[in-house]
Image (cartoon, rainbow, N blue to C red):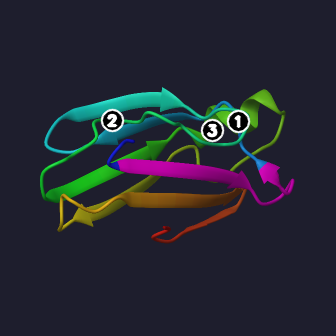
Amino acid sequence: MSAVTMHVLDAALGRPAAGIAVLLEGPELCARGTTDADGRIGDLGPERLPAGDYRLTFETGAYFAERGVDTFYPLVQITFRIADPAQHHHVPLLLSPFAYSTYRGS
């Protein structure tokens, strides 16, 4: 399993957000992927990452444009810290065209 996993839910539609391109970056690009039908990427990056600060970038503008929906946030970037490389880190994103929220999941 990847050290970092994520899940995107389209809160406006009440379903997973499929087809969102995601980048995982640390000191360098770690991984790139696209959310599946369940709004997840099962293999985003290595099984272990060193301690440090990382960023997930979600290309939300393209997701909404494909659906003919205007959005205020063309990109959502979430910066987080890995303090314990032995732990798994799950970062959910709840998304709508004009708002988003996130939290540390399990």
Q: How far across and how far down the image is residue 27, in percent?
A: 13, 43
User: Judging from the image, what secondary structure is the residue with disc 1 in?
Assistant: loop
Chain-order first, disc 1 or disc 3 = 1
Query: Pointer 3: what residue?
Result: 61
Report, in whole angstroms, how far the alpha carbon at label 3 lies from the one at label 2.
23 Å
Q: How far across and how far down the image is residue 41, in percent?
A: 53, 37
Amino acid on which the number 2 mark rests in the picture: Gly
On the picture, is 79 further left or further right than 74? left
Q: How far across and how far down the image is residue 70, in percent?
A: 77, 44
* Above or below: residue 11 compared with residue 15: below
Q: Nearer the viewer, mark 1 or mark 3?
A: 1
Query: Pointer 1: what residue?
Result: 18
On the picture, is 52 further left or further right than 12? left
Say which quarter of the image contains residue 32: top left
Amino acid on which the number 3 mark rests in the picture: Gly
Determine which of the numbered discs, if any, sits on residue 102 in the image.
none
Query: Pointer 2: what residue?
Result: 45
Seen from the viewer's position, the closer of residues 45 and 103 is: 45
- The magenta segment: 4-15
Q: Quadrant of the N terminus?
A: top left
Amino acid on which the number 1 mark rests in the picture: Ala
For image coordinates 81% across by 41% down, the residue present is 69
Q: Are marks 1 and 3 in contact (CB under 8 Å)?
A: no
For image coordinates 45% across by 49% down, the residue present is 5
Q: How far across and how far down the image is residue 76, in percent?
A: 50, 51
Magenta highlight: main SS: strand
For image coordinates 71% across by 43% down, the residue present is 17
Say which quarter of the image contains residue 101: bottom right
Chain-order first, disc 2 or disc 1 = 1
User: Judging from the image, what secondary structure is the residue with disc 2 in?
Assistant: loop
- Crowd band around label 3 with a 10 angstrom C-alpha radius: few (<14), some (14–19), many (20+): some
